[in-house]
Amino acid sequence: DLGDYKHYMQKEIFEQPQAIRDTLESRITKDTVSLSAFGHNAETIFTNIKHIQIIACGTSYNAGLVAKYWLEDIAKVPTNIEVASEYRYRNPVVLNNTLLVTISQSGETTDTLEALKSVKQHHNNIHTLTICNCAESFLTRESELTLLTHAGPEISVASTKAFTTQLVSLALLSVAIGKCHKQVDKKQETAIVDGLNRLPGLIKKTLEQESQIIELAQSFKNKFNAIFLGRGTMHAIAMEGALKLKEISYIHSEAFPAGELKHGPIALIDQDTPVIAIAPNDQLLDKLKSNLQEVKSRGSQMIVFEDEMSNVTPMQNMTVMSITHNLGIITAPIIFTIPLQLLSYHVALIKGTNVDKPRNLAKSVTVE
Ligand code: M6R
């Protein structure tokens, strides 16, 4: 039931504060991340693993890209990630004591499922965990450990609340493994849990900035290309922003790590190619600001989503939109996802596409 909403995508974007509350519920008690939430023997498994391999497709892959940063930064466990459609068809080296993490909204994506089955078939000394939104699915049945994202049914083909709840779940996983490996102390755990608990309120605040995004969306009316830039976890969020925009508005969008611009992609930039940059106030901000200077001289229209503390000085052809402030390593990528979801939604409305059922796409990809 759509209620007052026009599309499922819009409804699902606005359901995110609740979806995150539901995903956190019973996984956090007071300021402690529960290990048993992942399965009764999770503590033993997490303590013994030495490597993590993440496998997923599409938006779920983008969530995994963020998690790679978190798992190495917080839990200090070497982590690789690959799209399932590549991983399953090659002969990857799988080390003993690897935790194979699959991420999926549906739990039915053929490539992800087949990649998991093939690793299980060829390797004994590994463990498997799925982060999934559907309790009764192939992936949950095939995995030793499961953490369900409690996003509720996601109808729109473009994934929104499944993504942010996957990120929340992956944050819980990073803390859980970090605790088992004695890399996360009580102080850090309390700080991360506090950030996670603040998310529903912060997202609600960001959603209230929708009217500014509607205005920004107008300039995409006659555009055929767009470029998204970010560094660190924000590169993964830029990838997700580009995927959303191409999926529902059919604008060709690419994401690049901002530092890679000068190695080729900057050749694409001209007056007709808007550049969307994500600029949180982190240790990479100054580097990103100098990347924006490089873009400026090509005359393209720039949209910068910044943190209130980032102080990006608006230049000619640049709109700077401040999101919120005081974001941490976990909260920042989740919050910066919201304006990109809203932007793609409003651009699609302007383009008049079928928002919930974009051309050529299915909600669950059960073909090879
Ligand atoms: O159900 P899954 O998470 O395994 O699906 C993976 C992708 O097919 C999916 O995320 C797809 O990229 C979405 N349409 C993105 O919005």
Image (spheres, rainbow, N blue to C red):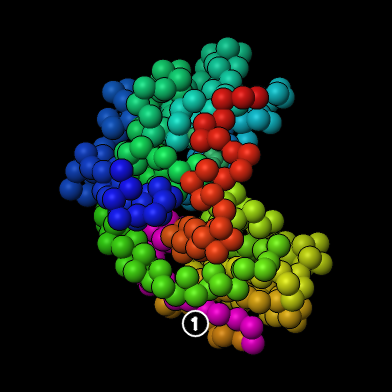
Locate residue 100, reporting x and y percent.
51, 28
Q: Between residue 192 and residue 356, name the one nearer to us.
A: 356
Q: Between residue 251 and residue 235, name the one nearer to us.
A: 251
Q: Between residue 24 and residue 43, name the one nearer to us.
A: 24
Residue located 23% across and 42% down the image:
25
Circle 1 sits on which residue?
311
Residue 337 visible in image: yes
Q: Residues within 10 Å of mark 1 (few under 14, many from 20)?
A: some
Residue located 71% across and 69% down the image:
273
Residue located 22% across and 49% down the image:
31
Q: Which residues are magenta?
A: 316-336
Q: Is residue 88 magenta?
A: no
Say if 322 sits above or below 365 in the image. Answer: below
Residue located 81% across and 62% down the image:
264
Classify residue 268 by image quadrant: bottom right
Classify residue 223 by image quadrant: bottom right
Residue 66 visible in image: no
Label 1: element kind:
loop
Say if 323 sits above or below 81 in the image. Answer: below
